[in-house]
Image: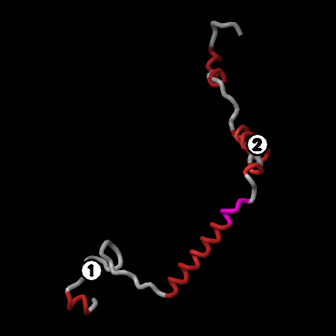
Amino acid sequence: MFLTTVLLKKRIPGKQWIGKYRRPRVVTLSMKRSMIQRLEVEAENEYWLSQPYMTPQQEYKHNTERRLAKWEAFKSQLISKFPEHKYVADHLNHLNVTKKWTQS
């Protein structure tokens, strides 16, 4: 326990590092440097994102063929996984063995 908090009766209720009334962390030089570095990276990202690679006219429908090919591949994959159709007549056909009142 901190001697000054005990003597001055200024205590931080509960855990001292979490909560609404917590003890503030000391900002170190390395923390400042890492924050500046992160801000520089973010500024560079914003710069590159602000300059588009293609114009809106070039970008309009530039990948239609590829999207259509992907959709066709996906559709054919779904169809290949889909089981073949089953009919009620096929499931109940074994019951027709003892039928004597129809012509077969």
Q: Amino acid at mark 2?
A: Leu
Q: Give the residue displayed 74% in from the left and 47% down from the top.
A: 60
Dot 1, how many residues are within 10 Å of its Cα: few (below 14), some (14-19), or many (20+)?
A: some
Element at label 1: loop
Q: Nearer the viewer, residue 103 or 54?
A: 54
**Residue corresponding to mark 1:** 12
**Residue corresponding to mark 2:** 68
Q: Quadrant of residue 12?
A: bottom left
Q: Nearer the viewer, residue 102 or 42?
A: 42
Q: Earlier in the sequence, mark 2 or mark 1?
A: 1
Q: Give the residue displayed 33% in from the left and 81% down from the top.
A: 23
Q: Could you tell me if the residues under marks 2 and 1 are in contact, i.e. CB atoms within 8 Å?
A: no
Q: Amino acid at mark 1?
A: Ile
Q: Give the residue displayed 70% in from the left and 40% down from the top.
A: 78
Q: How many marks?
A: 2
Q: Which residues are magenta?
A: 48-52
